[in-house]
Image: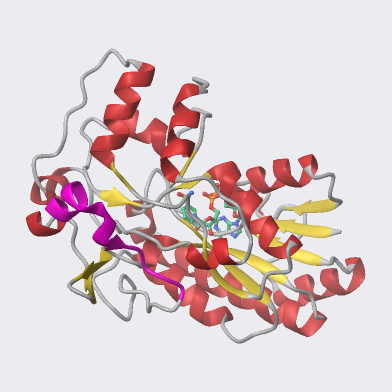
């Protein structure tokens, strides 16, 4: 049996759907049923029910966006740092392997490979970097699992949300047997206020940037595959290979969904942060070579984007 924590959430419900499809026996557990954030209760539960594997899809995401985390720092810290640490200790004591939903938002920018050398660029709003994205995308490389997070409490600025996610990874490191599955900007064909493709359509103005993104069903499939394939424990970036600019997403959306309204963009980062956002946003490219080398199959970002828009199900 697989124990699923946070099954009521946006990502948790996708895990539940995929586990059902795979006809896996699983137990969705909510804090309302049993407070799994308490070490003593969780350990007792693990010892009694003896799951073969635990999925942690629970955590604190600010709603409607990360700015909300700045207003509830204690809740954010509890959900994103203390919870994975508690689960890591309980699973280690009970001898149960587990997987944790982390985030790629602990990075900013990308790596650039030019003239035989790789350098890190943190800021996609730099015109030279943006020019490379448009004109020479092959030189843009993603952050790998061995790179140290550069959008964290240890490498500021960062949002409080990102800081707690990076610290969550640190808090569980070296304890027992676990996967860290880094998710980035979930999207799919189901219109939902949590879906990136829905958000883009509803923003009064669009923030143009560069990101790797994760199709929600592709993400949970890939995560479960790491366990089913018995890939080595550790960190895995789990995004659809490649990256997109928001402008490209909007243009594709305009072609396929033909929305009535015309999209407008924030004229600059300065305007975006003055009017629409409070805390810094992470925009980054992730490298998924490790996931692919482990034998996990996941389609490229363009295919997943086109598939989602061609099969769009409005709310
Ligand atoms: N959605 C995104 O854009 C995104 C992107 C990257 C990473 N992530 C990560 O994915 C995980 C799941 O996110 P989600 O979008 O599915 O969030 P969600 O819809 O808010 O669901 C999270 C679930 O976590 C449980 N939970 C346990 N402790 C909590 C706490 N202290 N505060 C709030 N909820 C708590 C709740 O379930 P019960 O109370 O029923 O147990 C809740 O339903 C999080 O770790 C998040 O950081 C999300």
Residue appearing at x 91%, y 70% in the figure: 48
Q: List x then y, in percent, for residue 187.
A: 47, 40
Number of marks present in the image shown:
0
Task: Answer whether residue 117 is visible to the viewer in this image.
Answer: yes
193 relative to 288, above or below = above
Is 83 displayed left or right of 314 in the figure? right
Residue 242 placed where, x, y %? 39, 51
Q: Percent x, y for residue 29?
A: 75, 54
Colouring method of the image: secondary structure
| Magenta segment | 130-145
Residue 132 belongs to the span the image colors magenta: yes
Q: What residue sits 16% from the left and 46% below the top?
A: 272
Q: Where's the N terminus, which quadrant? A: bottom right
Position of residue 134 in the picture relative to residue 33 (left or right): left
| Position of residue 201 in the picture relative to residue 127 (left or right) | right
- Within the image, what quadrant is residue 216 found in? top right
Task: Depth check: give the residue in front, 24 or 138.
Answer: 138
User: Which residue of the protein is positioned furthest toward the top in this rendering?
Assistant: 260
Q: Is residue 158 above or below residue 207?
A: below
Q: Quadrant of residue 225?
A: bottom right
* Residue at the extreme front of the image, as rendered: 116
Q: Is residue 189 above or below residue 9?
A: above
Residue projecting furthest to the right: 48
Give the quadrant of ligand 1. Answer: bottom right
Let me know if residue 278 is in the magenta part: no
């Amino acid at each position: 049996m697989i124990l699923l924590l946070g099954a009521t959430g946006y990502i948790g419900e996708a895990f539940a759907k995929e586990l059902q499809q795979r006809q896996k026996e699983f137990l969705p557990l909510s804090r309302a049923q049993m407070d799994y954030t308490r070490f003593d209760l969780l350990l007792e539960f693990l010892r009694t029910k003896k799951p073969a594997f635990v999925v942690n899809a629970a955590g604190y995401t600010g709603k409607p966006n990360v700015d909300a985390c700045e207003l509830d720092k204690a809740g954010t810290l509890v959900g994103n740092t203390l919870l994975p640490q508690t689960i890591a200790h309980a699973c280690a004591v009970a001898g149960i392997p587990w997987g944790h939903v982390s985030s790629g938002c602990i990075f900013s920018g990308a790596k650039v490979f030019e003239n035989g050398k790789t350098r890190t660029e943190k800021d996609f709003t730099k015109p030279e970097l943006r020019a490379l994205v448009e004109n020479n995308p092959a030189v843009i490389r993603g952050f790998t699992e061995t790179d140290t997070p550069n959008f964290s409490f240890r490498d500021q600025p960062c949002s409080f949300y990102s800081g707690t996610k990076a610290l969550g990874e640190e808090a569980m490191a070296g304890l027992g047997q676990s996967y860290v599955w880094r998710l980035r900007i979930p999207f799919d064909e189901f219109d939902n206020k949590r879906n990136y493709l829905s958000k883009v359509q509803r923003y009064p103005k669009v923030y143009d940037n560069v990101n790797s993104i994760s199709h929600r069903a592709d993400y949970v499939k890939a995560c479960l595959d790491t366990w089913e394939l018995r890939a080595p424990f550790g960190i895995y970036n789990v995004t659809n290979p490649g990256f997109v600019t928001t402008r490209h997403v909007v243009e594709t959306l305009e072609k396929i969904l033909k929305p009535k309204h015309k999209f407008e963009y924030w004229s600059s980062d300065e305007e975006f942060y003055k009017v629409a956002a409070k805390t810094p946003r992470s925009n980054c490219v992730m490298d998924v070579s490790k996931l692919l080398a482990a034998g996990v199959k996941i389609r490229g970002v363009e295919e997943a984007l086109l598939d989602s828009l061609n099969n769009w199900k409005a709310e």
